Amino acid sequence: MRVAVAKAVLRAARWKAVGEVPRTGILVGAPHTSNWDFVMMLLVMWRGDVTPRVLIKHELFRGALGPLLHRLGGIPLDREHPGEVVRELVREARSGEPFLLVLAAEGTREKGEYWKSGFWRIARAANLPIALAFIDGPSRTAGFGPTLIPTADVRADMDQVRAFYADKRGVHPERRTEPRLREEERPT
């Protein structure tokens, strides 16, 4: 039922979904420029019959929205103190069961200077692939691209990420943050 609803909503909204939904890995959703990105990514994932786990700032879990977000796969994250949640997710990912965690690497819907590096660090710690997902408003396309295995060379990994996202603009292209991590600027 959920698959049919997702396909119908995407069709009615005139959005095209592309690519295969990964079953395991750390899924980077970008560009993150709109409140609708979460809804769109859910629809595209449901179309592939996958319910993701999604890190969401803990403030959104207050009140009536909390139970709904939990039901949709949301995991509250205190961005000031993420350590315990991240450690628990890494333990779960290492269990051998299918594990797909969605992260908005930009960390905000506003234009920023850097992406958050959590997706890369969690993938390396849990020995999981990084799957690249996108939303492109100008083409009304959302979906999934390649996966990559993170290495110790963050610059080389991010060069692959940048190549994929080079033509992806988000719903509000002016808010897009270039894929870049602070870790790339540190001497190796």
Image: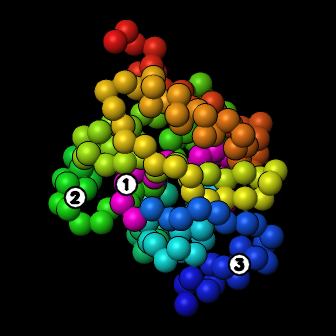
Name the residue at 67% across, 66% down: 17
Query: Quick check: marks 2 and 3 in contact, CB under 8 Å?
Result: no
The answer to whether 161 appears left or right of 25 in the picture is right
Q: Nearer the viewer, residue 142 or 34?
A: 142
Point out the stretch of residues depicted in magenta.
23-36
How was the colour assigned to the protein in this rendering? rainbow
- Graded by Cα atoms within 10 Å as few (under 14), some (14 to 19) or many (20 or more), the crowding at tag 3 reads some
Q: Nearer the viewer, residue 150 or 44?
A: 150
Q: Nearer the viewer, mark 2 or mark 1?
A: 1
Q: Position of residue 27 (x, y in %)?
A: 45, 52
- Graded by Cα atoms within 10 Å as few (under 14), some (14 to 19) or many (20 or more), the crowding at tag 2 reads some
Label whose residue precedes the other's in the sequence (2 or 1) = 1
Name the residue at 55% across, 90% down: 1
Name the residue at 40% across, 65% down: 23
Instruction: Tell me the amino acid under the disc marked 1.
Output: Gly
Which residue is tagged 1?
25
Which residue is tagged 3?
9
Q: Nearer the viewer, residue 40 or 75?
A: 40
Q: Relative to 94, is 48 above or below?
A: below
Instruction: Tell me the amino acid under the disc marked 2.
Output: Glu
The answer to whether residue 101 shows anywhere in this view is: yes
Label whose residue precedes the other's in the sequence (2 or 3) = 3
The alpha-carbon separation of the residues under discs 2 and 3 comes to 32 Å
Check disc 2 and report its element: helix, strand or loop: helix
Q: Position of residue 187 (x, y in %)?
A: 37, 9
Q: Nearer the viewer, mark 1 or mark 3?
A: 1
Q: Is residue 35 rendered magenta in the image?
A: yes
Check disc 3 and report its element: helix, strand or loop: helix
Residue placed farthest to the top in the image?
187
